[in-house]
Amino acid sequence: MTDTPAAPGVSALFSADGRLPTIPRKAARREQLLTHLARTLFEPDRSYTEHEVNDALRAVHDDYPALRRFLVEAGHLARPQDGSSYRRAAA
């Protein structure tokens, strides 16, 4: 995990312990969160196993499968057809 500062307003989504109490329902707010998570949890040019992705996201929110799905659907994480690995998508 890198120490990239949170985008303005993103830090308000997190509780004092650094966890996300809820995933934003509004698309714009969720996109802001997903951009932040992709930049802070995943290094560019590195492959991650599904287990590594799950562990990183679990540290943020209990519904890590939803976060993983949102990250893939929004184009922040890329994975091959067989789902064998994940990479942070190019900005």
Image (cartoon, rainbow, N blue to C red):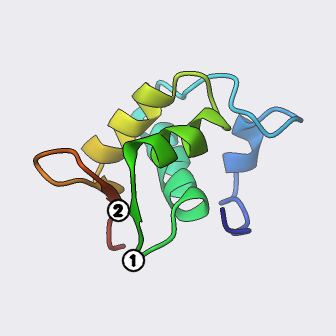
Q: Which quarter of the image is occupied by the C terminus?
A: bottom left
Residue 44 location in percent, x, y?
44, 74
Residue 48 location in percent, x, y?
41, 57
Mark 2 neighbour class, 10 Å CA radius: few under 14, some 14 to 19, many 20 or more? many
Which residue lies at the image location 36% right of the left edge and 56% below the top edge?
76
Q: Of label 1 and label 2, which has the lower sequence position?
A: 1
Q: Is residue 12 left or right of residue 71?
A: right
Viewer-side residue, 50 vs 9: 50
Residue farthest right in this picture? 16
Give the number of callouts: 2
Q: Which quarter of the image is occupied by the N terminus?
A: bottom right
Q: Amino acid at mark 1?
A: Asp
Viewer-side residue, 45 vs 90: 45
- Residue labelled with disc 1: 45
Which residue lies at the image location 44% right of the left edge and 46% below the top edge?
31
Residue 88 position (above or below residue 51): below
